[in-house]
Image (tube, rainbow, N blue to C red):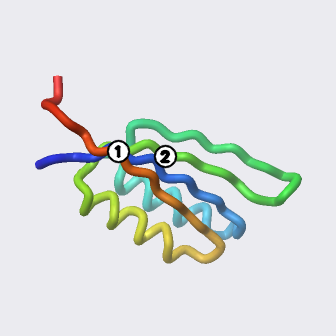
Amino acid sequence: METRIAVIGIVVEEEESVELLNEILHEYRKCIIGRMGIPYPKKQVSIISIAVDAPQSTISALTGKIGKLKGVSSKTAYQGVKGQER
């Protein structure tokens, strides 16, 4: 199945949603290439970036679950993957 590379930018404003977010990310751990989290106490938010390599449907399912969390917003940037895996 063809996969795409995507970067998901997440801003968490509600601390009580962090545990649920981590559970979702754990569920999709096999398609996560890397993750960077930055707490930003000055604005009382956490900023997380997730790089993924997965089929479009999997990325959509992941971002859909993230989007349902209270006080969590996200945006996704995609890049199509051409050629075969090495």
Instruction: Residue 50: give its label.
Output: 2
The residue positioned 61% from the left and 77% from the top of the image is 70
Q: Is 1 positioned to the left or the right of 15 in the image?
A: left
Q: Is residue 37 above or below residue 15?
A: above
Q: Nearer the viewer, residue 32 or 9?
A: 9
Looking at the rendering, which quadrant does residue 80 occupy? Answer: top left
Q: Which residue carries the number 1 mark?
A: 79
Q: How many marks?
A: 2
- Which amino acid does the dot numbered 1 rest on? Gln
Q: Is 67 positioned to the left or the right of 37 in the image?
A: left
Give the secondary structure at mark 2.
strand
Looking at the rendering, which quadrant does residue 17 occupy? Answer: bottom right
Q: Nearer the viewer, residue 45 or 74?
A: 74
Q: Residues within 10 Å of mark 2 (few under 14, many from 20)?
A: some
Residue 37: % across, % down: 63, 44
Q: Is residue 20 above or below residue 5?
A: below
The residue positioned 66% from the left and 62% from the top of the image is 12
Instruction: Residue 55: give its label.
Output: none
- Which amino acid does the dot numbered 2 rest on? Ile
Give the secondary structure at mark 1.
strand
Q: Is 44 positioned to the left or the right of 51 in the image?
A: right
Mark before the other along the chain sequence, 1 or 2: 2
The residue positioned 35% from the left and 44% from the top of the image is 79
Residue 32: % across, % down: 38, 43
